[in-house]
Every structure is written in structure tokens, then in C-alpha cells.
Image (cartoon, grey):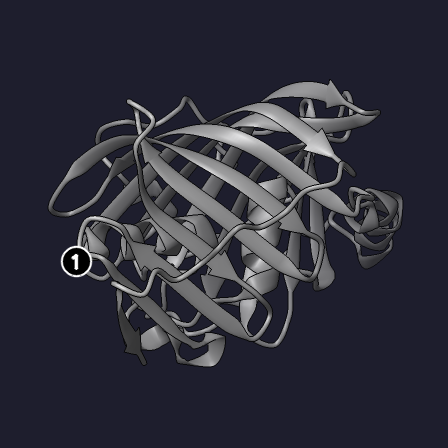
Amino acid sequence: MNKFACGLLVLLCSVAWSSCSFHRLVAGRRAKSYDSTQAVTSSSYALFPAMDTVVTLSKPADDTTEAINKLITEITPIWKSRLQYTTFSGKAKVHFEGPDEKQEFTAHIRLRKDSIIWINVTALGGLSFAKILVTPDSFFMTNVMNKEVTRMPLTHAAKILPTKVDFNSLQNLLVGEPLRDGNITYATGFVGSWTIQVEDSSYIQRITYNKADSTLRSGQMRTRDPKGPQAITEYGSYDMVAGRHVSTARVININNGADVFSIDMNFTNIRFDEPQDYPFSIPKSYEIKDK
């Protein structure tokens, strides 16, 4: 159970990126996805190269710096647009597949922006078997079956997870936003969509938007290290919630070395800016494990 709960957090954080190509991702459950490498019309800009190697983007002669910069300028307001909220909550039906197991469960999620994330994981019958509490500097997880609590500084979470936990990336994934900020370094247009490449000091992202309503279609991410991890997140089934377009169906496919993970999340009862609490107590009978 402890291993499973840790795996859940890894998936929700979407930080277990792998070195495998996006085009050799998870076999099995996966939503039909948009293929950013498909052929483009004559009005499109150059395709991005494969994300599984670190390269310098090369552009054909007709892909002038002026044209690229013009498109970047047009798309920048969409890239910078973020959901405005104080609190978020929702219930997600989740299908999880990992190297050793498959699980169906429900995640009850509450978060206060930039402050706290609370997740209550229940079996389909409603029995709670794990609670996770994350703050920008701390991580807590109860294991109901084993009657134990793991607690640690968030910077130490890599002791039980394949890689470090990023609070903002977890928050953004749960709400349905791009996982990280960064600067647009390239942009291209397809029929019905735009795709941008965004970079920061640690990661390179490839974000695809629907032209019709500027909603997210997919996000791909890899580390700058060509042998580092990668993942893809797909967004679909948008609903209007309190004046906000929110994706209620998300598919995350992750490889981490030899380990392959996938998770389907289908949200209901999404709410913004409502009062909420974050109940998390440690029973006296529970064993406390500090990391």
C-alpha cells in the first residue's frame, strides 16, 4: 500500500519523466491523442524535432525569424493566461497502471493555491486507504492499512520517490494548467492548433493549444538531459466551471527508466473559491516514519 500511494503521488506530480521517446510511450490504456508530428499544411510552420534528443531547432528558409517571432507574439497572451482562483476542489475517478499492479480508485482533491494540497484516496467502495498532504516545504502521507505516517521536508521526497517533488507542477496538473512556466523559444501552427516550445533552466515543454477556444490539448515535457525523464499529459472533455474552461478528462503517460506508468483521471464536482478544510491528523497508534 505504501508503494502504491507513493506511486500515485509520483503520477499526480508528473515528475517521473523518462528518457524514452514520447512516441514509444505506454502500451495499454491511453486516450486517443493528437499527434504533433503529423503532416502539416503549406501554411504551417516547421515541425518540432523529436523530443528524445537535445537538439537545436533548425528552420527551413521560408520559416523566417520575423514570421516565427510574429507567431510567438500572437500566442504569448494565451501562454501567459492562467486560471484565476483561490481554492480548487474536485473528485477524480482514477485508473492507475504501474509496473507491478493496476488499481481503480477515487481521489478527493482540495487545494489552496500556492499553499496546500490535500488528497484523500479511497477504494471504489468508499473506504479511505491513504491521505496525502503537501505544502511548498513539507510532505505527509498516511497509510491506513499499515497504520503508519510518512513525513519529511518536501526537498527530501526523492528518498521515497523516483525524483524530486515540485509543488507548483503538482498544483498545476491537478487544476489543468501547463506544468511549468518558461519562455517561448519556438512556435508553429497546425490545422486547428498551435504548438509552442517553452524552456526554463531545467525542462523543455511542448504545449499544444486548440485554436477554437485556446484550451490546452496536450503537454509534453523532458529534462534538458537527453537521458533524463519524459512524459506526456493529454487534456480533454472541457466543461465551463464558474466561468473557467476546465479539462475534466486527463491522461498521463510516464516512463521512468524501465518502469512504465499510466493514469486516467476523470473529474467531477469541480469547484473554485469555496471554503474548505484540510483534515489531516496522526492517530496515536500510527507509527511515524521521518525521512
Camera-side residue of 45 and 179: 179
Residue at 74% in and 35% down: 272
Q: Can you identify the residue that label 1 sits on?
A: 258
Residue at 32% in and 81% down: 291
Residue farthest along the left direction in this orientation: 100
Residue at 39% in and 57% down: 230
Q: Position of residue 92 (x, y in %)?
A: 47, 30
Q: Determine whether, in the image, residue 188 is placed left or right of residue 154.
A: right
Amino acid at circle 1: Ala
Q: Is residue 26 above or below residue 52?
A: above
Q: Determine whether, in the image, residue 92 is placed left or right of residue 173.
A: left
- Residue 212 in view: yes
Q: Position of residue 231 (x, y in %)?
A: 41, 51
Q: Is residue 73 above or below residue 107?
A: below
Mark 1 element type: loop
- Residue 58 in view: no
